[in-house]
Amino acid sequence: MVDKWRKVFQSGKVVIGALHLPPLPGAPLYKGKLLREIATYVVKEAKKLEEGGVNALIIENYGDKPYRKRVGPETVASMTAVALKVSESVNIPIGVNVLRNDVLAALSIAKAVNAKFVRSNVQSGVYVTDQGLIEGEAFETQRFKKLIFADDVLVLADVFSKHASPLSSRSIEDEAHDLFFRGLVDAIIVTGPRTGLPPSLDDVKKVKETIQNGKVLVGSGLNLYNAEKLLKECDGAIVGTYFKENGVINIKKVEKLVETVRKLR
């Protein structure tokens, strides 16, 4: 798993910049904007992140709230079209996250656009969410990767997913252990309770100690002020909302955070 990781991210602390897509066709908030216009906007934001020094990008249908457990074909088609434009416009790896938890759709898009990783918000266990109960699909994910010849696509999976509560009363260590060693994910993501809030330092430490040499990422709430503390205990972070100002990415904020992370490598 480490070798696969290095092929995508090289070494050192990783900063993955999140590209939050505006509402896409089929979403309740979609207002009929042409897909090529959406793609043009997203590519512009992607280039800011790349210029700011992030190691990779992850594209997610953030604007499609309220989310469904599984998305429709219109979402898959739209995300593929936008992701392909991004892939052709940057020189860093890209990943895909299909909200709320459609990892098979994410893998399909990744295969189509040569993305290198996907994020699964619920990969094992059962969680209560605002979409109802979501069950992990570790077996289905690994089987589907084989089916479409996507063994090289990394699966980054959340433990104690944000905006969700596990049905079990197991510890975060037990959940992380099974997610990594039985679910066969390539990295574990630790988040706060909701978007924009960081995880506890204690949770990050526990997960990292549990999976030994496995990769652990902070998945929400990382900023210039807590980056040194959190990243000393893990391998990188996915950063989205912190990079934004008035709804768009501020390259200066990207550069400052990336510079802070580089000092920790």
Image (cartoon, grey):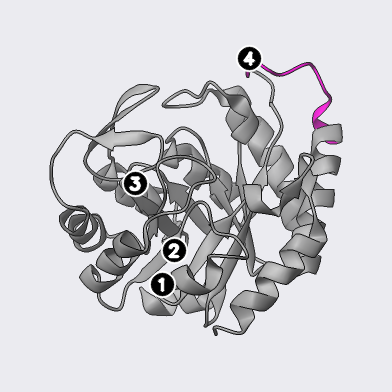
Q: Are the residues at dot 3 and dot 4 in contact (C-beta closer than 8 Å)?
A: no
Q: Secondary structure at mark 4?
A: loop
Q: In this rendering, is residue 190 above or below 139?
A: below
Residue 187 x %, y %: 38, 63
Q: Is residue 125 left or right of residue 67?
A: left
Residue at (42% x, 57% y) in the render: 156
Q: Is residue 64 visible?
A: yes
Residue 28: mark? 4
The first of marks 3 and 4 along the sequence is 4
Cα distance between the residues tagged 2 and 4: 31 Å
Residue 217: mark? 2
The first of marks 2 and 4 along the sequence is 4
Tag 3: residue type? Thr
Tag 4: residue type? Pro
Q: In this rendering, is residue 98 above or below 184?
A: above
Mark in the foreground, 3 or 4? 4
Cα distance between the residues tagged 2 and 3: 20 Å
Q: Are the residues at dot 2 and dot 1 in contact (C-beta closer than 8 Å)?
A: yes
Mark in the foreground, 2 or 3? 2
Q: Which residues are magenta?
A: 27-36
